[in-house]
Amino acid sequence: MAWSEWERYLDQVTNCVVFRYDRADIREELLAHLEDHAQCLMEEGLSKEEAAKEALLAMGDAKEVGEALNKEHNPVLGWIYRISRWVLGLLIVLNLPTVLTVVLMILMTAGQVLMGYDEPRTEEYGAVVWEIDPDVKGKSYQTHFTVDYVRRYEDGTIQVGYRSWSDLFPPSQGWSLSLSYEMEDGERVFGGGSLSSGLISYGEDRLREPVVDDALYVVYYEGATKHRIRIDLPEEDGIWLAPNWMGEEDAP
């Protein structure tokens, strides 16, 4: 009997709400309130039937409650909310390839950050003779970069490790970052290396020319403007590359 009275009450309240899409949520919320109130009354000593009736009486007149809820659930605002959800869902579907690309880039970037740089190539180039943190930073168009280390191996190979990333909302399309290296007199030092992809990219360049100066210059361009950043190298005797790099039996 009590349940049927609850059902009639909930029907009367929700029928007053013009925006029918909200009726189910309103009904569920009111039913939960009735059940909680009845449970509290039973814990105070009332029977299940008595508690159900008392909880229903405490809710108030169904028509008054329904009219008040109808004012809160304005049909105009309700339609705006539902249409906004539909539009958002449509945009997500239409832009799913872009969203998947962004997610993939984020995952790739997370992987690159976790992996970082390759381990020193001690088997290929020999042990690391020295390694410095030059604290070199720069920006080419919308791409930032920082040189994290310069490392020299036993065979003379010099390796430069750097990170690069672009502005999230660049004002214009710029060129991709391209670093090169020179000695004090401007003579270019040729090399090769690798560059990962992602929102943050990790690059490692290995210089193929003998470096005998006490400094190495990182070079990059912005249009016709050339930038050179000096990196001081540790003092030592001449640095030469391994025979397998120079194509000779013995390095000079």
Image (cartoon, grey):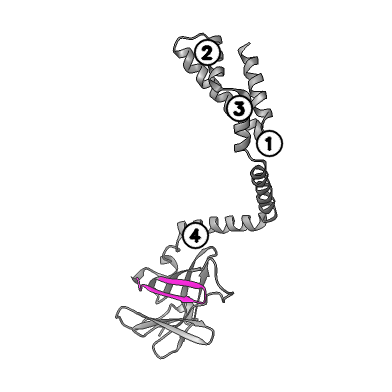
Identify residue for label 1.
21
The answer to whether residue 39 is above or below residue 165 is above
Helix, strand or loop under label 3: helix
Helix, strand or loop under label 1: helix
**Nearer mark to the viewer, of 3 and 2:** 3
Crowding around mark 1 (Cα neighbors within 10 Å: few <14, some 14 to 19, many 20+) is: some
Helix, strand or loop under label 2: helix
Point out the tag, 3 or 4, that comes first from the N-terminus: 3
Circle 3: residue type: Glu
- Residue 226 screen position, x and y as percent: 48, 86
**Nearer mark to the viewer, of 1 and 3:** 3
Crowding around mark 3 (Cα neighbors within 10 Å: few <14, some 14 to 19, many 20+) is: few
- Residue 137 screen position, x and y as percent: 41, 74
Circle 2: residue type: Ala
Circle 3/circle 4 CB separation < 8 Å: no
109 to the left or right of 71: left
Measure the alpha-carbon separation of dots 3 and 2: 22 Å
* Residue depicted at 62% across the width and 24% down the height: 62
- Residue 157 screen position, x and y as percent: 42, 75
The answer to whether one can see residue 43 in this image is yes
